Amino acid sequence: MAYEISEIKKIGIGLVGFGILFSFLGIILFFDRGLLALGNIFFLTGVSLLLGWQSMWQLFTKKANIKGSVPFFLGLFLLFVRWPVAGIIMELYGSFVLFSGYGPPIQAFLYQIPIIGWILQYPFQLFGQFRRKRA
């Protein structure tokens, strides 16, 4: 295998996935505070396992990332003081600003997954066969 993932990183990936799932379910189920809080806890724990505690601390406290860190933690605070809609909006903005630099590595990783990579690289081939043929 070309690249081995340690057990800690596998757990981190799982926790990030569960965090996204619980947050999505919390939004779908009319901003359920319990699911949103659980999603945040899973997501932050997973990111800390993936990056490491020191790298995560540097990610949130670096001067260049303050523009994303403040809205993220403000959204987390708003979620815990029973303003879930405003909290999620702030968290999504903060997450987008904080993690936008990780887009190209994630895209390269997804392209290497057998079925998902094919779908992402050739989306029009997949949907082109379902188009109607005009007579």
Image (cartoon, rainbow, N blue to C red):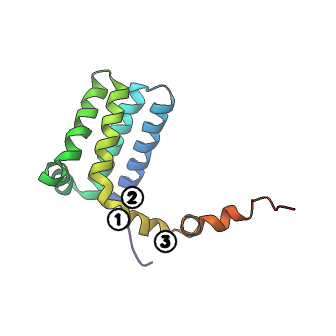
Residue underneath mark 2: 10
Q: Is residue 77 left or right of residue 3?
A: left
Estimate how packed mark 2 is, as few (under 14), some (14 to 19) or many (20 or more) residues with alpha carbons within 10 Å: some
- Calculate the distance from the C-alpha at mark 3 to the C-alpha at mark 1: 18 Å
Residue 61: percent from left, percent from top: 14, 49
* The image quarter in which residue 107 lies: bottom left
> Can you say which quadrant of the picture contains the C terminus?
bottom right
* Mark 3 in CB contact with mark 1 (< 8 angstroms): no
- For image coordinates 32% across by 42% down, the residue present is 93
Tell me residue 89's x, y (percent): 35, 35
Disc 1: which residue: 6
Disc 3 to disc 2, C-alpha distance = 17 Å
Q: Amino acid at mark 1?
A: Ser
Left or right of residue 99: residue 55? left
| Crowding near the residue tagged with mark 1, few <14, some 14–19, many ≥20 C-alpha atoms within 10 Å | few
Determine which of the numbered discs, if any, sits on residue 112 in the image.
3
